């Protein structure tokens, strides 16, 4: 794994700096307010309309604006200040109260009524379907007091917990074991793209590439988002030149490909994503998808996919196939990926190379100026935050055996987090064992007499902190002090909580969620609710639908198939990322975006890489960032139109 050529290309994109700065000052405070109250509503709105928020766009817009203000103030933004703005934008855009919009839908949904679980959804998740607050579409009602307080408390614990085990694992895997973290430079390069432009180096390649991506994003966003939104405000029906979220083709292909969900997603952002992702990971996903497309008609004719019937579209087809086969098969595939990850970690300990170059003295002698705090403080944060989760779960779900909560937090979480941290450090791969949480809930119901679905909504301490190590590595590569990150978290938290609640309330009051005003939510939330609630029926009395769908033979088939595919590809000496991509692509999902993603991978590999050489690896993330920025700008412009005009005519709703 250490010798994989593609991983080496990503690993060597950036070198670790020797100078660090905090980057925290009044600019970052103003930036937090700007992001929370101007960027967050646009991101929330786009999430409901097209399924993706403005994401990187909000970060880049903030950086551009502050850079221009700095120039006109005869000053400049340092690279560390830019990264801190970028970091805070990411933290601010994860709107916690958006989860309450999902909760209000779930408790009223047709899926909950169909599966008979409406009455079992606890009041501390969302008020019952007869609550006046749901009719009036408002969170400012006493029925929402407990859900909001619980959400606030969980967010406090989560923010503190960010500097617990994840930071400790970063110190172990990066400082002691010296793992390369090959994918961290990709993220760090995107955040550094505008640093040169703030120093008035407008002729730098980063600024030019970013601008090209931005113009493409503006043009496409105008057609994809702005035109439907504005025309929908003027005419009775919106004008959609490009269908959202995809062109539905399942009914047209059912004669040739029965039980296969087909369609085409025309979001060209997928093209840029395909250029950025490692080529062999995309190819592996394509191979896995082709296998799925070939297998589904066979499974249908063999009487395995029994719930699918002609006339179904994508959402119903995916759910029916999941119920009949792919949920169980996917569990086996996930176990195969987990086994492969654990095997690689165990094997890496016996190898010489990047993983064995450090010493444990590095735990207590970190690089000077990086802003590290004592290693044992991070362990203490992990211990007390996990204990807080355990006590909270014990209070919310007193009938569930508390020993499970301790096992989640103090046994499973550190083990899987360390495995993932090493896999991220070696190969840039995330490791997860599927359905550990769900299996433990079912065991609690079967062997300890628990009945209900409250446990599915409790903030149980099952976490995988391995991915956090990559974030800390990105912070290090940009030369930003960790102390600056801590200060930014303290500042951005209250802004996020207040803005998230206010705008969740405002967007909900404009129109029911989901509805025709929010096409992505209207199209896919029903499928998500069916899949979510199907699993939750496993802890209710009787022969639940989950147990009807779960078949041990299919689980073992998925496990065996995943391990065999991995073994064959390994023997053939194919790249590590292809192996993971194939296993990932074998899962049942909506494949409609794969065509553009593959097209992007081919363009990047066989055209741009040949034309620009190794520099293309650095161009691609910056081009994607520029596209996201342009796309997000049109999205925010559309959101401004919609929110202002709809709020003027709110009585119509």
Image (tube, rainbow, N blue to C red):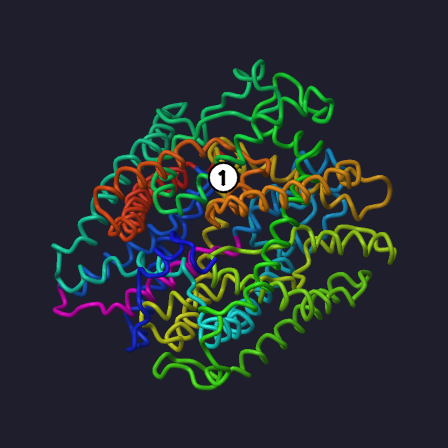
Report the magenta residues as a range: 72-97
**Measured from the top left, where is residue 60 in percent x and y?**
29, 54
Residue 563 against residue 297 in the figure, above or below: below
- On the image, which quarter does residue 14 sit in? bottom left
State the residue lying farthest toward the top. 255
- Residue depicted at 48% across the width and 40% down the height: 284
The kind of secondary structure the magenta stretch mainly shows is: helix
**Badge 1 is on which residue?**
285
Q: Nearer the viewer, residue 437 or 47?
A: 437
**Measured from the top left, where is residue 51 in percent x and y?**
46, 40
Tell whether 266 sits left or right of 522. left
Q: Nearer the viewer, residue 33 or 591?
A: 591
- On the image, which quarter does residue 4 sit in? bottom left
Q: Please rate how many residues cluster around mark 1, counting C-alpha atoms within 10 Å: few if below 14, some from 14 to 19, many from 20.
A: many
Residue 347 against residue 563 in the figure, above or below: below
Q: Nearer the viewer, residue 635 or 279?
A: 279
**Measured from the top left, where is residue 166 in percent x and y?**
52, 69
User: Across the whole image, how many numbered discs are drawn on residues?
Assistant: 1
Q: Secondary structure at mark 1?
A: helix
Tell whether 124 sits left or right of 252. right
């Amino acid at each position: 794994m250490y010798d994989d050529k593609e991983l080496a290309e990503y690993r060597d994109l950036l070198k670790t700096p020797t100078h660090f700065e905090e980057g925290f000052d009044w600019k970052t405070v103003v930036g937090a307010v700007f992001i929370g109250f101007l960027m967050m509503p646009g991101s929330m709105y786009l999430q409901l309309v097209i399924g993706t928020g403005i994401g990187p766009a909000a970060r880049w817009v903030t950086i551009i604006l502050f850079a221009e203000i700095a120039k006109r103030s005869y000053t400049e933004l340092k690279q560390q200040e830019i990264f801190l703005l970028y970091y805070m934008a990411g933290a601010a855009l994860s709107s916690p109260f958006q989860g309450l919009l999902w909760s209000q839908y779930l408790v009223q949904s047709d899926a909950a009524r169909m599966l008979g679980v409406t009455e079992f959804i606890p009041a501390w998740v969302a008020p019952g379907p007869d609550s006046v607050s749901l009719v009036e579409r408002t969170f400012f009602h006493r029925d929402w007091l407990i859900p909001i307080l619980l959400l606030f408390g969980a967010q406090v614990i989560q923010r503190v917990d960010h500097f617990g085990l994840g930071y400790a694992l970063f110190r172990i895997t990066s400082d002691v074991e010296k793992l390369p973290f090959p994918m961290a430079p990709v993220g760090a390069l995107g955040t550094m793209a505008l640093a040169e432009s703030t120093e008035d180096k407008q002729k730098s390649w980063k600024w030019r590439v970013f601008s090209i991506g931005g113009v493409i994003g503006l043009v496409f966003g105008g057609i994809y988002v702005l035109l439907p939104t504005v025309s929908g405000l003027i005419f009775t029906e919106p004008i959609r030149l490009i269908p959202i979220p995809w062109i539905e083709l399942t009914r047209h292909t059912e004669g040739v490909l029965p039980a296969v969900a087909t369609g085409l997603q025309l979001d060209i952002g997928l093209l840029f994503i395909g250029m950025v992702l490692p080529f062999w990971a995309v190819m592996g996903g394509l191979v896995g998808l082709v296998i799925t497309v070939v297998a589904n008609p066979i499974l249908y004719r063999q009487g395995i996919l029994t719930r699918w019937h002609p006339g179904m579209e994508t959402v119903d087809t995916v759910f029916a196939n999941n119920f009949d086969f792919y949920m169980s098969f996917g569990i086996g595939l996930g176990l195969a990926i987990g086994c492969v990850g654990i095997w690689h970690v165990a094997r890496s300990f016996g190898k010489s190379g990047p993983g064995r170059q450090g010493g444990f003295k590095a735990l207590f002698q970190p690089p000077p100026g990086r802003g590290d705090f004592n290693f044992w403080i991070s362990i203490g944060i992990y211990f007390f935050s996990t204990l807080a989760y355990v006590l909270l779960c014990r209070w919310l779900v007193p009938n569930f055996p508390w020993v499970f909560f301790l096992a989640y937090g103090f046994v499973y979480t550190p083990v899987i987090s360390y495995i993932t941290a090493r896999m991220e450090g070696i190969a840039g791969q995330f490791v997860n064992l599927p359905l550990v949480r769900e299996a433990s809930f079912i065991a609690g119901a079967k062997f300890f007499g628990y009945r209900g679905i409250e446990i599915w909504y409790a903030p149980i301490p099952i976490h995988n902190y391995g991915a956090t190590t990559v974030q800390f590595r990105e912070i290090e590569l940009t030369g930003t002090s960790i102390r600056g990150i801590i200060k930014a978290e303290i500042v951005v938290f209250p802004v996020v909580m207040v803005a998230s609640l206010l705008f969740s309330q405002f967007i909900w009051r404009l129109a029911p969620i989901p509805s025709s005003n929010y096409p992505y939510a209207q199209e896919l939330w029903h499928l998500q609710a069916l899949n979510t609630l199907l699993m939750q029926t496993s802890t209710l009395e009787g022969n639940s639908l989950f147990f009807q769908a779960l078949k041990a033979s299919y689980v073992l088939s998925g496990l065996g198939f995943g391990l065999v595919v991995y073994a064959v590809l390994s023997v053939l000496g194919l790249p590590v990322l292809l192996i993971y991509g194939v296993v990932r692509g074998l899962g049942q999902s909506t494949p409609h975006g794969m065509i553009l993603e593959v097209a992007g991978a081919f363009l990047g590999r066989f055209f741009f890489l040949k034309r620009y050489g190794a520099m293309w690896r650095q161009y691609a993330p910056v081009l994607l960032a520029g596209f996201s920025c342009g796309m997000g700008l049109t999205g925010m412009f559309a959101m401004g139109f919609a929110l202002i005009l709809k709020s003027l005519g709110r009585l119509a709703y």
